[in-house]
Amino acid sequence: MNAVTETIAADPVSGIEIFVPLAKLKKSPRNARKVPHGGAAIEALAASIQHKGLIQNLVVEPEVKEDGTPTGYYLVTAGEGRRLAMLLRAKRKQIRKSEPVRCWLDTQNDPSEISLDENVTRTPMHPADQFERFAELADGKGWGAEEIGARFGVSAGVVKQRLRLGAVSPKLLQVYREDGLTLDQLMAFAITEDHARQEQVFENLHHNREPWIIRRDMTAANVPAADRRAVFVGADSYIEAGGTIIRDLFSEDRGGFFEDAGLLDMLAIEKLREIAGTVQTEGWKWAEAHIDYPHAHGMRRFYPQSVALSDEDEARLEALSTEHDELAEGYSSYDEMPEDVATKLEAVSDEIDAISAKRYAHDANVIAHGGVFVVLNHDGVPRLERGFVRPEDEALADPQPEDEGEGEAIDPEAVADEQAGDGDEDEQQIEEEDEEPGRPISDSLTRDLSAHRTLALRVALGERPDLALIALTHTLTAQLFYSYTEAGCLEVRPTATPLGSHADGIEDTPLAAKANESREAWAERMPRDVVDLWGFVAGLDDGKRLALLAHCASRTVNALRLPWDRKPRSLQTADRLASALALDVAKDWTPTVDSYLGRVTKAHIVEAVTEGVSEDAARRIADMKKPDMAQAAEQLLVGTGWLPAILRTPEPEAEQPAPDEAEDAGIVEQPSEMEAPDTETEESEASYAVAAE
C-alpha cells in the first residue's frame, strides 16, 4: 500500500500507512493503559528513536466531532509511549513539532481492543538474552557503557550491570534460562568474570543457594577492601602494581575485594619497611617491619623517660595554650567554628602535641643498642613499638653499677676460721679476731635480727593502710613493668598470663590495643631505674596511685577455663567480679563463624539462633548443612547482642546480712548453688589431704 502524508483531515481509509505531523497526534481516551508511562520508560524510548529512528509505527484513528466532522487530529490507539517520547525529543529541540510520524490508520478494529492487544499479546525477551546482547554490543562494536546507555535510554550504571551479567559463564546463563538460578543468584556469581571459579562454586553449592553464600564462596580467596592491609596500601597503589579489584555491582561491596592477597602482603611489607627505614634514622640500631606484631620476640622493652623541656619550648607551649583557649572559646566542637578558625585551631593543637611529645624520650644507650617494631594496627594504621633490646645487647643498653653490699666485704679468712670449729682454734686468736674493727656479725644472728624487724614491719604496716597501698602498688609495678621480683619487700607475686596462645588473633584486637595503650601510658611516666620507683609511687596523689594499682591488678586477672587446670572457686570469683563491673562482653565480641559458630555443633548453633533471634529463625536453618548453617546464623545474630553462656555476666547476688545480724536472726550460712563444690574437685582435694597425712 502507498504511504500517505497527512497534512489535513482525510477520509477514513483503514489499513494504510500515513505520516502525521507530531502536533496532530493526541492520546486516545480509549487507550487500555490507565497507569501512565514512567519517566524512565519514556527516556528509553526517546533515546532509542533518536539513534535508530521509529522502528514501530503508531496505530491511529481520526478524531471526529459529535456530528462526525473530522477535527484534523488523530487519536493514538497504540503507541502512546512512542508519542510521548517524540514530544520529549521536540521539547529538547531535537525535532520540530511538525515532524511527520509514521502511523497505521485503523478504523475497522475496536481501539480499546487494539490498545489492550499491544500490551498483552507479546512475549518479553528473557533477561539472559538481553544481557548477552548488551555484551555483544560492547565486544563487537566496542561501545562503552555510556554510549550503550545513551542508545537505550538507561544509565551507564545499569549498562555495566547488564554487561557484567552477560559476562557470566554461558553454562550458568543457560541454567538461569532454565530457571535453575534466580536473578539474585546470578548477580552473586557475577561478582567476578572468572568462569572457572563461577562454575566451581556452582558445582559445590548445596541445597542452600542464598546469594550471600555464593558471594562468600566467590570471594573466599580474596581480601575485602576493609581489611587493614588493603586500607594501608590503598586501592591506587595496589592497582598500579598490577593488582585487580573485584567489584560487586549489585550490592554494597564497601570498596570491593582485592584479588591478589600475595601482592597485597608484599606491598604492605614494602611500605612498612619504608617507614621502618625512616624511624631508624632516629638512631635506633635496628627497625623491623611486620604485618602482625611478633609476640614471641623474647626481648626486654625499655620505655621513654621524662625529659625537661627547654626554656624556649616551655615558653612556646605556654603561648600556644593561651592561643588555643582563645580560639576555642565559645565553641563546643570544630563543627561550630568558621572554617578558618577550625583550621588555625587544628594547627595550634598539632604544634602543642609536637612540643608535648618532647617531654618523653628514650635513653641514648637504649636507642643506640635497641630497636623498633613497625607493625600494622587493626585499623590499617602503622604502629611504632620502640625500645626493644635483644638479649645480647641488654648489658650495653642498660649498664648497671656493680652491686654493693650492705656492709663491708666479708673477709674470706675470717669466714674460714668461723667454719673451722671450736676444737681446733686457739681461744686467744679467736678473741683477737672478735675484737677486730669492722668484722661482720654472723649469718645466724643476721637472720635472727631480721626476723624481728620483719615482724615489726608487718605489725606497723598493718596499722598504716596508706603506706600499705604504696608498698603493694610498688611491689606489683616493679614486677610487671621492670621484671624485678626482688625489688619489692612484699611477697606478692603477680602473674600476667599471655592470652595469645589461647585465642588466635586476640592480641591484635581493638580491646588489646586499648590495654596496651594503658600500659604504655603508665610506662612512659615511670623512672628508668627501679631504685627510683618507690619515690615515684609515693609521690602520686591518691587517685593516680589507685589508678596504677588498678592497672597492675587488672593485668593479673585470669578467668581462663582450661581442661587441665580445674579451679571452680577462682571462676566463681571471676563471675562475681564481672557482676560487680557490670561487664558487657557484647561490646567487643560478636558470634561469627570463626569465633564461635563454626566451632560448635549444629545443636549449639540452633540454640544460639533460638535465644538470640527466634524459634522460627532457628527452624528455618535447622536442616542446613553445618557450614551453611553457621554462615546463616552469623548473619541472623548480627546486632542481637547474643553471647554464649561462658561470656555472659551473672546477675548481681543479693546482699547478704551482716554476720552479727545473721546470728541474731538464727541464720546458718549455707553455700549457694554457685559456691557448691565441684564433686570431682572435692574428691581430688580429699585424696590430696589423705596423702598429705
Image (cartoon, rainbow, N blue to C red):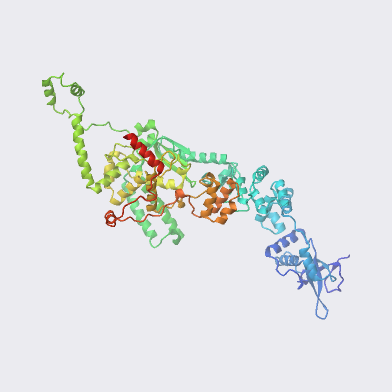
Q: Say if residue 16 shows up in the picture.
A: yes
- Is 402 on the left-hand or right-hand side of 613? left
Total labels: the figure holds 0
Q: Is residue 114 above or below residue 244?
A: below
Q: Say if residue 252 shows up in the picture.
A: no
**Which residue is outermost to the bottom?**
67
- Is 547 on the left-hand or right-hand side of 61? left
- Is 682 on the left-hand or right-hand side of 162? left
Q: What quarter of the picture does the C terminus occupy?
A: top left
Which sits in the foreground, 399 or 511?
511
Residue 420 on image: x %, y %: 19, 21
**Which residue is outermost to the top?**
424
Which sits in the foreground, 491 or 234?
491
Q: What quarter of the picture does the N terminus occupy?
A: bottom right
Residue 496 on image: x %, y %: 38, 41
Which sits in the foreground, 59 or 86?
59
Residue 266 on image: x %, y %: 54, 39
Q: Dividing the picture into quarters, in which one does residue 333 lie?
A: bottom left
Q: Dividing the picture into quarters, in which one does residue 8 lie?
A: bottom right
Which sits in the foreground, 177 or 436?
177
Residue 418 on image: x %, y %: 18, 23
Q: Is residue 511 above or below residue 283?
A: below
